[in-house]
Image (spheres, rainbow, N blue to C red):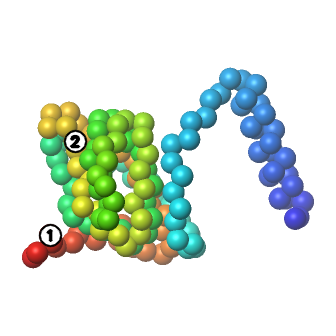
Amino acid sequence: MNHLTYTIIFSVGIAMNAAAQNGMQRKDLLHANIIERTVSSVKVVEVEFRGGQKGAYHKHPCPVVGYIVEGTCLLQVEGQPAQVLQAGEAFFEPADTPILHFDNYSANQPMKFVAYYLLNGEKELIELLPKKGE
């Protein structure tokens, strides 16, 4: 390890110790295993859905992680069971895997989420897919 690496580790250790002393609490929201890939940039977007709005059948060229800021979300990644996420909960969408549902679970209340796209030169963030059977 070079000098810079030691400095970073030391600084992180000091910051973590200071946070514990200041009463800061950490809550694990998500641990996602992604296929090893180079990440050259991260694009962060905030998206709002109106009550009852449904996301299109789609996939992403890169892994996407995020969290629900407000409302509730129905998420279903192809091959996995559907799940309802509440505000404050995190999600993971694997690269090149169809997303069957990313819908506002409430018919009346808005839903807002923040998504982090782990990019490696990809330009488009989303690919809309034809509905099954079309």
Name the residue rendered at 43%, 74% in the picture: 122
Name the residue rendered at 90%, 60% in the picture: 3
Q: Is residue 56 shown to the viewer in this render?
A: yes
Three-letter amino acid code at disc 2? Tyr
Is there a contact, CB below 8 Å, between mark 2 and mark 1?
no
Name the residue rendered at 41%, 50% in the picture: 91
The 10 Å Cα crowd at callout 1, few under 14, some 14 to 19, many 20 or more, is few
Three-letter amino acid code at disc 1? Lys
Depicted 82 relative to depicted 63: above or below? above
Residue 85 lies left or right of residue 29; in this view the side is left
Taking depth in this image into account, of 29 and 40 the one nearest to the observer is: 29
Residue 117 lies left or right of residue 13; in this view the side is left
Which residue is denoted by mark 1 in the rendering? 131
Label 2 sits on a secondary structure element that is loop
Name the residue rendered at 51%, 48% in the picture: 30
User: Which of the 4 image quarters holds residue 56?
Assistant: bottom left
The 10 Å Cα crowd at callout 2, few under 14, some 14 to 19, many 20 or more, is many
Q: Is residue 126 shown to the viewer in this render?
A: no
Taking depth in this image into account, of 119 and 94 the one nearest to the observer is: 94
User: Which of the 4 image quarters holds residue 64?
Assistant: bottom left
Which residue is denoted by mark 2 in the rendering? 105
